[in-house]
Image (tube, rainbow, N blue to C red):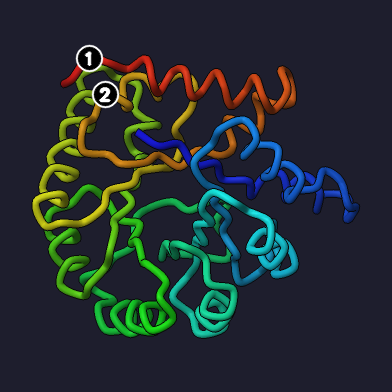
Amino acid sequence: MKFSLNIDHVATLRNARGEKDPDPIAYALMAELYGIDGIVVHLREDRRHINEVDLRLLRELVKTKLDLEMAAVEEIVEIACDVKPELATLVPEKRQELTTVGGLNVIDNLEVIKDTIDELHNTDIKVSLFIEPDIEQINAAKDINADFIEIHTGKYANLRIEEEIYDELDRIRQAAKYAKKLSLGVNAGHGLNYNNIKEFAVLEDIDEVSIGQSVIARSIFVGIEKAIMEMRQLINSAKTKI
């Protein structure tokens, strides 16, 4: 299972004082040195963390893979087509939310999402849809030519009752397996951390996890290298299949 790092909240900390530090670009490049498989950023319409300058610098400097999370709105689509990340992940976006709170409803927004996928494909950008582990949403993603899905793991991350946790893990496992049968790539993310990743990382059909806030928070205490290495070790040590 690959491990990509979302660096949005390095920029959140920078923006809190309107200063230049901490620099999300430097953080990303250091993370690459310590072995992550890709960098993830969300260019929001309100630019609350990562901004367009950050994105363009990352495109110039990132050597692994750049995954741009984005809403299916024309301004951001135009930027994406110009910057050309390796992957564009379409996510729902609300101005008032603190963080993305659920998966994209592909079924109810089919035409807009399909047009966005077509536009991104025209500039050779692969597209992932951030969705719930739901078979009908996966079918819709396949029907409009998405290349990947990213399974929203927020519900799993927030559950506390063991039986409910394993029920949700099984739901995710079944969704990932089904998506693979449709020849979709399968990523996952949201709320994954040092406490819940080991149980999650046993899922066989997840190609990659995207993790951000927990690693950034951990790096404040132990440094970037150790924070990344600890997460990588937890992912790699999850051997038991469920």
Circle 2 residue: 202
For the point 58% across and 80% down, the residue is: 82
Measured as percent of width and height from the top left, residue 161 is found at 29, 19
Amino acid identity at mark 2: Val
Left or right of 236: which side holds 19? right
Measured as percent of width and height from the top left, residue 208 is found at 37, 41
Left or right of 63: which side holds 149? left
Measured as percent of width and height from the top left, residue 4 is found at 49, 42
Q: CA distance from mark 1 to mark 2?
A: 6 Å
Q: Are marks 1 and 2 in contact (CB under 8 Å)?
A: yes
Work out whether 212 lies above or below 17.
above
Work out whether 235 lies above or below 88.
above
Is residue 204 shown to the viewer in this render? yes
For the point 82% across and 43% down, the residue is: 22
Circle 1 residue: 240
Q: Earlier in the sequence, mark 1 or mark 2?
A: 2
For the point 51% across and 79% down, the residue is: 81
Work out whether 78 lies above or below 12.
below
- Tag 2's secondary structure? loop
For the point 22% across and 72% down, the residue is: 145
Q: Is 36 or 15 nearer to us in this picture?
A: 36
Left or right of 223: which side holds 171? left
Q: Is 106 or 68 nearer to us in this picture?
A: 68
Q: Quadrant of the C terminus?
A: top left
- Tag 1's secondary structure? loop
Amino acid identity at mark 1: Thr
Is residue 91 shown to the viewer in this render? no
Which quadrant of the figure has residue 188? top left
Q: Is 44 or 224 nearer to us in this picture?
A: 224
Measured as percent of width and height from the top left, residue 85 is found at 52, 65
